[in-house]
Amino acid sequence: MTVAVEQLFEHLWQDYTTRLCPSAAKVQKLLAGSEALLNDHIALRTFNLPQVGLDRLAAPFIAIGYVPCGEYHFEAKKLFARHFEHPDPRAPKVFISELLVGQCSAKLQETVRSLVEQVPESLFNNSEFLYSGRPWSLSFDDYQVLSEESEYAAWLAAHGFGANHFTVSVNQLDTLEEVKTVNDVLRGAGFVINEAGGEVKGSPDVLLEQSSTMADQVSVNFTDGDKTVPGGFYEFAKRYPLESGELYSGFVAASADKIFESTNVQ
């Protein structure tokens, strides 16, 4: 990987492990064998408003060589997503989603637009905004109102910019060859597995199997006090080969739909 790619993902990792998913270090210790874990992909969230839309988040990745690939639609959750890949296959894939704000209630639209209006244009002058956290003020009351309609909107409003998850490539693990086996190890260590749609989402038939922990509970500063809310989570993915012999590099919308629920309030 290029230095630029390595540096960006290191910054994203530091933010993810300190602010959103402190338990990531424990996962690493549980699963790492003789070599460092390979990161399959990360995921980022945003609103589809011009100031902060998907293209804004994609720009720093495109600048270091990433190219857009698959597109994904999540009608029930009112989300659109696209994933990006780097010419270097060792570089993690990037999955960026955005909430289709215009399809939501008038109250949600009003609240989200009031948040985004607080974002200075200068925030996007460099790639640091990708791991800068929340660039707006938010009350816990507004967080709760958003959560009633969209868990995604509430999570994004609470945390702002940052990777909501990193993903262990199960293909690269030394001893744990199946997603289900990874889940068993994590459960034994006290982790809660996301069982929405089944604990293993996908199958060899769709060339991708995935699972994830439920999000860490982290403290967030709201205008009306500190509250504990869902933060980031860890995902695990096993990819299967295409007829060409290369591993499938895309995503499965039906599985990703359930992975989103890893950050739901339990």
Image (cartoon, rainbow, N blue to C red):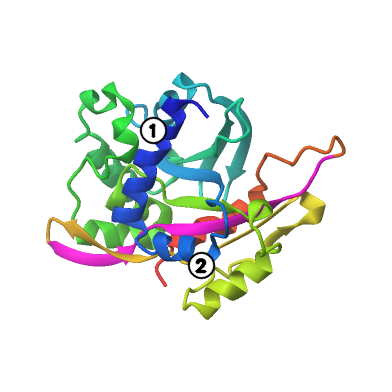
Query: Split into 4 quadrants, where in the image is the C terminus?
Result: bottom left
Q: Which residues are magenta?
A: 225-242
Of residue 209 and residue 30, the one placed in the foreground of this image is 30
Please provide percent x and percent y for residue 106. Answer: 34, 46
Q: Residue at x 26, y 67 (%)?
A: 228
- Describe the element under mark 1 as helix, strand or loop: helix
Distance in Å between CA atoms under marks 1 and 2: 25 Å
- Describe the element under mark 2 as helix, strand or loop: helix
Position above or below: 217 against 128: below
Local packing at callout 1 (Cα closer than 10 Å; few below 14, some 14-19, many 20+) is few
Q: Residue at x 49, y 77 (%)?
A: 189
Query: Is 224 colored magenta in this rendering?
Result: no
- The amino acid type of the residue labelled 1 equals Gln
According to the picture, the residue beneath numbered tag 2 turns out to be 30
Please provide percent x and percent y for residue 249. Answer: 68, 39
- The amino acid type of the residue labelled 2 equals Leu
| Left or right position of 98 against 38 | left
| Left or right position of 26 against 132 | right
Please provide percent x and percent y for residue 44. Answer: 44, 42
Q: Residue at x 24, y 41 (%)?
A: 115
Q: Residue at x 79, y 55 (%)?
A: 204
Query: Is 238 colored magenta in this rendering?
Result: yes
User: Quick check: can you spot residue 223?
Assistant: yes
Q: Quadrant of residue 143?
A: bottom left
Position above or below: 16 against 116: below
Residue 28 image label: none
| Left or right position of 215 against 237 | left
According to the picture, the residue beneath numbered tag 1 turns out to be 7
Taking the view exactly as shown, the residue that stands out farthest to the left is 224
